[in-house]
Image: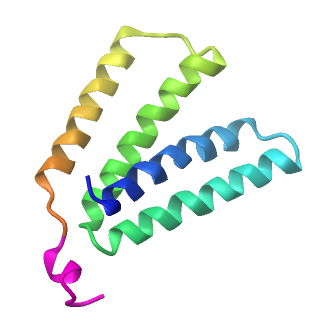
Amino acid sequence: MNANWLKVFIAAFFEVFWVIGLKHAHDVWTWLGTAISIFISFYLMIMAGKKLPVGTVYAVFVGIGTAGTVLAEILFFGEPVKLMKLLLILILLAGVIGLKMATKENTAIREGGES
């Protein structure tokens, strides 16, 4: 995995925090943590989108963030576990992995073309 895809995965990780923060933040510190997570998440996604196809970056970002948020809600906030929900998350992740595997980094940009 190259550095740009790593940025997408880290951005999706922070997406889970800010999405949960939007629901559960209750004081200035939790709102500040949510805002910082939003900044980091979008900054890394935008930086990765400069080198990778934006549509694929966004799909992977949202897919991983969605799966992570649903799993975090189940693990930490008592959301009921439903077999259908878990099956659909697996299908979503299969699509995300497929998109990532089918997408190549833009070599013209990487080799010193446009920046």
Residue placed most toward the observer, 2 or 43: 2
Position in image of residue 104 (x %, y %): 14, 62
Q: Residue at x 29, y 66 (%)?
A: 54
Q: How is the image coloured?
A: rainbow
Position in image of residue 23 (x %, y %): 69, 37
Q: In which image quadrant can residue 109 be found?
A: bottom left
Position in image of residue 99 (x %, y %): 18, 48
Q: In which image quadrant can residue 91 be found?
A: top left
Determine whether 66 is above or below 35 in the image.
above
Residue at the extreme left of the image, as rendered:
102
Q: Residue at x 19, y 66 (%)?
A: 105
Determine whether 87 is above or below 66 in the image.
above
Residue placed most toward the observer, 91 or 45: 45
Chain part drawn in magenta: 106-115
Task: Locate residue 77 relative to residue 84 in the image: left or right.
Answer: right
Q: Tell how many labels.
A: 0
Residue placed most toward the observer, 81 or 108: 108
Q: Residue at x 38, y 18 (%)?
A: 85
In the image, residue 9 lies in the stretch drawn in magenta: no
Position in image of residue 46 (x %, y %): 43, 69
Task: Locate residue 18 relative to residue 88 in the image: left or right.
Answer: right
Residue at the extreme right of the image, as rendered:
27
Determine whether 86 is above or below 37 in the image.
above
Examine the residues drawn in magenta and state their main secondary structure: loop
Task: Locate residue 113 relative to residue 17 in the image: left or right.
Answer: left
Q: Residue at x 48, y 10 (%)?
A: 81
Quarter occupied by the C terminus: bottom left
